[in-house]
């Protein structure tokens, strides 16, 4: 039975090699070898010995398989012919001899000169496969939505309601805080520039259009992607790990109907509302900062706001909100369903989901900018 | 050493040998729900002690307290003569190198290959050279019946039985004096289960560690245990060789050991039905 901290006898050298005999002594257990330098010094001492010597292990106080492995290596993985040892020690070495682990085959050489090309190709193929799967998911979603509208009583209303609460109501705090602060920052930044041109009064137009049309939707979408998108992927991913997805399929419950549809519908409802909320808070922050920096009165700011923001801009902001909501939910569900049943895949899936949905949001935003400018609104 | 000789040895040694693990006056409570109250348990060196008890009787909780994952509300847990809850974190780390734990689901690190999983505790010592670690790991894998081809696999690619084997190899990596098994054969088919039992028994004979095992499986229990501790009524109601435990008159023991399944597993060890006047 090993006891902790029993000190090895350092008076007697662990390896004593004289003439044709080699005497081992002291503590050859893992605890002794764990002290720094011990393995190296014993390895060094054993290097000058060979299995053909006469071996004497009777001085060894403690021996376990790790210490025995050190000796076993020096013996060249075979038992010496002339050896004196106790029965217990012989048993340890016989256990090693009986379980001679063959060494793992060397890793195949990786002198693949065109590996980078293959990596690019793999990446593109993977991206295309994801795109196709997302498209198929969107198509299935339309079918599911049609089925739900045809028989609204059977729709997953409870799930939708729960998701609306989780992705909408619970996100109010963080979107408010970030929106408000961005409004303040933007206002301060523009106020400095506008003052140099004496164009102070245009602060309302500048804030109004940029926040309502661009910043509000994108800001809300990025926050929701990080918050709800990751949650959706992780939740569906864990359902894969715990075989809940299989259980649903066995019961004939379609993943599209019960998992994807409620989340997409919920996010397409909550995202425009969150966009409105973020817009309002960002404008509030901008307004207060404008008053502090430029002395613009709150009353005047509010009065000129309706003229600054056209209804079209408002509509564009809301449309973006709906699109981003659907995009985030679809991407999150897609990567959640692709999680394999192990923890590493779960982490990777969640990361990919968030990165993809944020990139997607910005891509779609750029696409909208091009479309709207080409039709002139 | 055959089973009876081993048992006789323990009976003789029980008086003289200091226990490896001694639990005294242990109390565990989750809120108002008391799981253990004034529980005592001693584990002797070299034995295989099985912990049995009904669902919710706190077997796994007790195991977690013995390996220091949870702290009891009262009482002391001594492992290898040291009080677990009076140790500094550094002392605890050194002490914990003396035991290996096989978790119920294996708890292999899914990011690491089989080889790296087994090598991890050895590498954590930070003093062993990589070639020695490689030797030890391959020997451990051979001991649990795995080949070099399995060493590169990921835990996700392994079957349930293989996961248990790798987890056992990892638990044994540091050549611990103490091995804790939590439901070692749960989730294995009878054949794999028997293989695993034979594996633990042969390793026990080769390496001579002490085993504390939590199990529900009567076949495993009968095949491996040198002593059985029965948890019921919030304490250990019996801790003795199996054939004496089954003679203790307690509703749980009747239900667990002397039902139809129990009698089938016990075979000759089961007392005659008339002895208790109960079916």
Image (cartoon, rainbow, N blue to C red):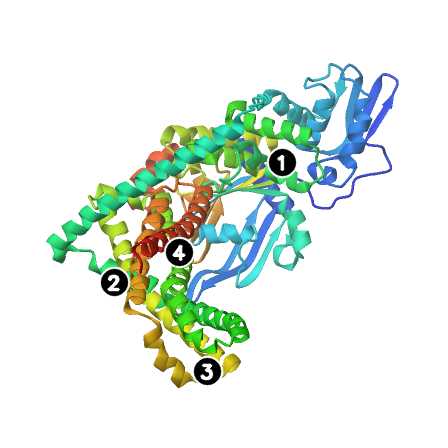
Comparing marks 1 and 4, which lies closer to the viewer? 4
**Neighbour class for label 1 at 10 Å: few (<14), some, many (≥20)?**
many
Dot placed on the residue nearer the N-terminal end, 3 or 2: 2
Image quadrant occupied by the C terminus of chain A: bottom left
Whether pointer 3 and pointer 2 mark residues with C-beta atoms closer than 8 Å, the reply is: no
Discs 1 and 2 share one subunit:
no
Q: Which residue is mark 2?
A: A161
Badge 4: chain ID: A
Which residue is at the far front? A197
> Which type of secondary structure does the marked residue at label 4 adopt?
helix
Q: Are marks 3 and 1 in contact (CB under 8 Å)?
A: no
What separation in Å lies between label 1 and label 4 (alpha carbons)? 48 Å
The structure residue drawn at horizontal position 73% and vertical position 14%, both measured from the top left corner, is A81
Tell me the CA gap for discs 1 and 2. 56 Å
Along the line of sight, the residue nearer the viewer: A341 or B98: A341
Q: CA distance from mark 4 to mark 2?
A: 19 Å
Residue A225's tag is 4
Identity of the residue drawn at 42% across and 58% down: A222
Are callouts 3 and 2 both on one chain? yes
In the picture, measured across the screen, residue A312 lies left or right of residue A112, that is left
Callout in the foreground (1, 2): 2
Q: Which residue is mark 1?
A: B175
Looking at the rendered structure, the secondary structure element under dot 2 is: helix
Could you give the CA–CA distance between mark 4 and mark 3, rounded to whole angstroms? 35 Å
* Rendered residue at 23%/41% (across/down): A250
């Amino acid at each position: 039975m090993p006891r902790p901290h029993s000190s090895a006898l350092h008076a007697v050298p662990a390896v004593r090699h004289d003439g044709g005999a080699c005497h081992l002594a002291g503590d050859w257990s893992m605890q002794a070898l764990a002290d720094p330098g011990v393995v190296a010094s014993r390895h060094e001492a054993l290097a000058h010995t060979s299995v053909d010597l006469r071996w004497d292990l009777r001085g060894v106080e403690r021996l376990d398989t790790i210490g025995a492995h050190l000796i076993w290596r020096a013996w060249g993985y075979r038992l010496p012919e002339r050896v004196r040892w106790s029965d217990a020690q012989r048993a340890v070495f016989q256990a090693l001899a009986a379980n001679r682990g063959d060494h793992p085959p060397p890793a195949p050489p990786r002198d693949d000169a065109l590996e980078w090309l293959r990596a690019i190709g793999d990446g593109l193929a993977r991206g295309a496969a994801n795109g196709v799967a997302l498209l198929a998911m969107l198509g299935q979603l339309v079918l599911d939505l049609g089925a739900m509208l045809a028989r609204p009583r059977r729709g997953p209303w409870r799930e939708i309601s729960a998701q609306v609460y989780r992705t909408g109501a619970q996100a109010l705090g963080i979107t408010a805080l970030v929106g408000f602060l961005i409004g303040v920052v933007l206002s301060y930044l523009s106020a400095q520039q506008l003052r140099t041109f004496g164009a102070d009064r245009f602060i309302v137009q500048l804030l109004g259009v940029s926040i309502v049309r661009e910043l509000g939707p994108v800001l809300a979408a990025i926050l929701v992607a990080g918050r709800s998108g990751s949650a959706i992927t992780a939740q569906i991913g864990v359902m894969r790990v715990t075989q809940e997805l299989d259980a649903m399929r066995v019961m004939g419950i379609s993943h599209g109907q019960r998992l994807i549809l409620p989340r997409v519908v919920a996010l397409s409802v909550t995202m425009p509302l969150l966009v409105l909320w973020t817009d309002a808070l960002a404008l509030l922050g901008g307004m207060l900062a404008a008053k502090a920096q430029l002395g613009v009165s709150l009353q005047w700011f509010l009065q000129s706001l309706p003229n600054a923001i056209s209804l079209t801009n408002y509509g564009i902001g809301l449309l973006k909100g709906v699109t981003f909501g659907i995009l985030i939910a679809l991407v999150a569900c897609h990567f959640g369903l692709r999680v394999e049943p192990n923890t590493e895949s779960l982490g990777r899936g969640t990361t990919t989901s968030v990165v993809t949905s944020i990139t997607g949001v910005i891509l779609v935003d750029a696409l909208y900018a091009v479309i709207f400018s080409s039709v002139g609104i | 050493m055959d089973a009876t000789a081993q048992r006789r040895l323990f009976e003789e040694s029980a008086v003289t040998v200091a226990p490896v693990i001694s639990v005294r006056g242990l109390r565990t409570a989750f809120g108002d729900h008391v799981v253990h109250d004034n529980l005592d348990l001693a584990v002797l060196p070299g034995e295989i002690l099985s912990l049995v008890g009904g669902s919710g009787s706190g077997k796994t909780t007790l195991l977690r307290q013995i390996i220091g994952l949870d702290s009891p509300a009262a009482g002391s847990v001594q492992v290898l003569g040291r009080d677990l809850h009076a140790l500094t974190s550094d002392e605890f780390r050194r002490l914990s190198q003396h035991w290996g734990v096989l978790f119920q689901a294996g708890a292999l690190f899914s990011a690491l290959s089989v080889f790296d999983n087994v090598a991890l505790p050895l590498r954590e010592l930070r003093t062993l050279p990589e070639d020695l670690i490689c030797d030890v790991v391959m020997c451990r894998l051979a001991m649990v019946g795995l080949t070099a081809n399995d060493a590169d696999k990921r835990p996700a690619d392994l079957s349930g039985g293989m996961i248990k084997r790798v987890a056992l190899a990892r638990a044994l990596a540091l050549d611990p004096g103490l091995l804790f098994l939590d439901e070692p054969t749960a989730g294995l088919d009878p054949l794999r289960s028997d293989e695993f039992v034979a594996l633990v028994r042969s390793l026990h004979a080769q390496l001579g560690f002490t085993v504390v095992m939590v199990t529900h499986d009567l076949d495993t229990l009968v095949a491996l245990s040198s002593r059985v501790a029965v948890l019921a009524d919030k304490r250990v109601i019996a801790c003795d060789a199996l054939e004496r435990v089954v003679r203790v008159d307690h509703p749980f023991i009747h239900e667990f050991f002397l039902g139809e399944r129990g009698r089938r597993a016990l075979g000759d060890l089961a007392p005659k039905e008339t002895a208790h006047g109960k079916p």
